[in-house]
Image: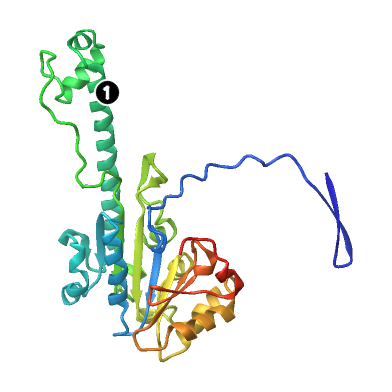
Amino acid sequence: MCYIYNMEGMKVTTKKIKEFKKVPDTSITNEYATSENSLRAPGLTLVIGTRNTGKSYTTAKILHQAKDDKLYDRFFMITPTYDSNRRYWDFLDIDEEDVHYPTHDAIDKIIASLEEERDEWTSFVMSKKLYEDFKSKTKNAKNIHNMDLLDLNTFIDLGFLDEEGNPTDVPAPMWKRDIERPCQSCLICDDILGSSALKNAPGLTKLAIQNRHIAPLQEPFGARAALGVSCYFLSQCYKGGGGGNTGGIPRGLRENATNLIFFRNKSENVFKAIIEELGGALAEEEIKAAYKYCVVEKHDNMMIDLFPRCETKRYRKNLNEFVMFGEAAANCKCKK
């Protein structure tokens, strides 16, 4: 079927075709299940503010809510100031082995830990399937005597049967955590600007671009095909103006951020840099209006959700107040 339009003085004809109607499976999103007003995860959140504006405090507020929601199973941290800032992070119960000094291989070590978590989950799933298969095939003694030799040897090797083919008291495999799911994790990078972890890390680009796809699973678990990891980068400088310790957050992280949180700054450079990078995707006048409303007092902050569930809920003041624009906001149909 053809359609004819008049566009800016030109006659334009369009024609529908039958190809390209099949769509790929979109059920695999690699997202963790989160509440309506929580930040989507796994995400990449940049928290920008000068000293004593409230970066750690605000990030801790987000993670307090995440912990209440049982969103994460394991936390990692890269920072040179963990001991002096324990008051912000102690509630996370981070294992000492998961706190890293910002060396060049810190990120690679964390990715390796996630891959170990993936392998452990894979082993558990396999053991659980074998145990369920064993229970199904040994419902009565007759089944055991008629069992395939390969199955018999497998179940003996796993300890489900003794050498004479009798069932043992081996319990069903149990996952190591209360919630039976592949590990959902979060990484906090605090005060690492100019460190080896940012300048030379081989895993930094992988972390920035593939944080939702790190440690792929052999079999999907719900909407997840990988463990993934949420990342929070706390920094005094957004973009920077040179090399060395003033380089700011690397471009790969800025371009792949899902959320920006920034505070009042004596210099307009941070805000201008953000507008420069987001101006093509977001309305500049909205960003400026939201900032004027959100950032008034010293510890106020503004969040820009770059991938919001609802377009009208892109901006927030101090995390818990949406700033919405236009008539669309009043007619928003999403959950309040």
Name the residue at 57% across, 72% down: 282
Name the kind of residue labelled 1 in the image: Asp
Observer-nearest of 3 and 154:
3
Say which quarter of the image contains residue 173.
Answer: top left
Name the residue at 35% across, 81% down: 236
Observer-nearest of 320 and 132:
320
Name the residue at 28% across, 29% down: 129
Give x and y (percent) for residue 212: 41, 54
Q: Quadrant of the C terminus?
A: bottom left
Say which quarter of the image contains residue 267.
Answer: bottom left
Q: Looking at the picture, does residue 303 appear above or below residue 34?
A: below
Q: State left or right for residue 58 relative to residue 254.
A: left
Give x and y (percent) for residue 134: 23, 22
Say which quarter of the image contains residue 153.
Answer: top left
Tell me if residue 202 can be seen.
no
Q: Which residue is mark 1?
A: 133
Query: For mark 1, does the 10 Å Cα neighbourhood hold few (<14), some (14 to 19), or many (20 or more) residues?
Result: few
Name the residue at 44% across, 82% down: 294
Give x and y (percent) for residue 154: 22, 21
Observer-nearest of 333 and 259:
333
Q: Dot 1: what SS?
A: helix
Q: State left or right for residue 260 relative to residue 7.
A: left
Tell me if residue 222 can be seen.
yes
Q: Quadrant of the N terminus?
A: top right
Give x and y (percent) for residue 266: 41, 91
Observer-nearest of 335 and 289:
335
